[in-house]
Image: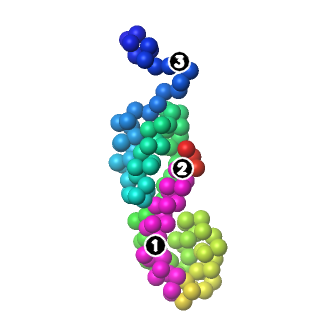
Amino acid sequence: MTENFENQNVNEPAKVERQKVDMFLMSNQTFFPSSKMIYLKEKLYNLTEEKFAMLSMVEFKNPTTLLIISLFLGSLGIDRFMLKDTGMGVLKLLTGGCCGILTIIDWFSVLNKAKEKNFNELIMLL
């Protein structure tokens, strides 16, 4: 038991266990862009236990849910309001999705936008 205390610096906060980080990433991988998972993993490995505990308070937007909402209510701008893109939401609401053009564009881009939004939210927290 004394060996553990000798190896750990008293002034240095405890780092997160790699297993916790791996479990977090496995359970939340659909919320983040796959191209940024390695960067995210490195950032999470360097977190303290206190900051890692704060991650449980963050609510991530589900990209699949946003896609379904975009398919059915995209012309009303609901998908943009959920992504906190109020300006585009109002534009789509008032113009009927710019006569459907923005609605169709959003069907293909809403998944990536939701994942980027989740990633940026997480990075701001870290």
Picture disc at residue 123: 2
Query: Which image quadrant: the C terminus?
Result: top right
Residue 92 lies in the magenta-colored region? no
Q: What residue does disc 1 label?
A: 109
How far separated are the C-alphas under marks 1 and 2?
21 Å
Q: What residue does disc 3 label?
A: 10
Type of amino acid under label 2: Ile
Residue furthest top in the image: 2
**SS label for mark 1:** helix
What is the crowding at mark 1: few (fewer than 14 residues within 10 Å), some, or many (at least 20)?
few
For image coordinates 44% across by 13% down, the residue present is 6
**SS label for mark 3:** loop
How far separated are the C-alphas under marks 1 and 3?
48 Å
Residue 75 position in % (x across, y down): 52, 81
Residue 115 position in % (x across, y down): 46, 61
Task: Please indicate, yes or no, whether residue 14 appears anywhere in the rendered image.
Answer: yes
> How many numbered circles does the render carry?
3
How far separated are the C-alphas under marks 3 and 2?
28 Å
For image coordinates 50% across by 37% down, the residue present is 47
Residue 85 position in % (x across, y down): 60, 68
Q: Are marks 3 and 2 in contact (CB under 8 Å)?
A: no
Which of these two is toward me, 63 or 43? 43
* Magenta residues (range): 100-123
Type of amino acid under label 1: Ser
For image coordinates 50% across by 19% down, the residue present is 9
Horizontal relation, residue 84 to residue 63: left or right: right
Which of these two is toward me, 119 or 77? 119
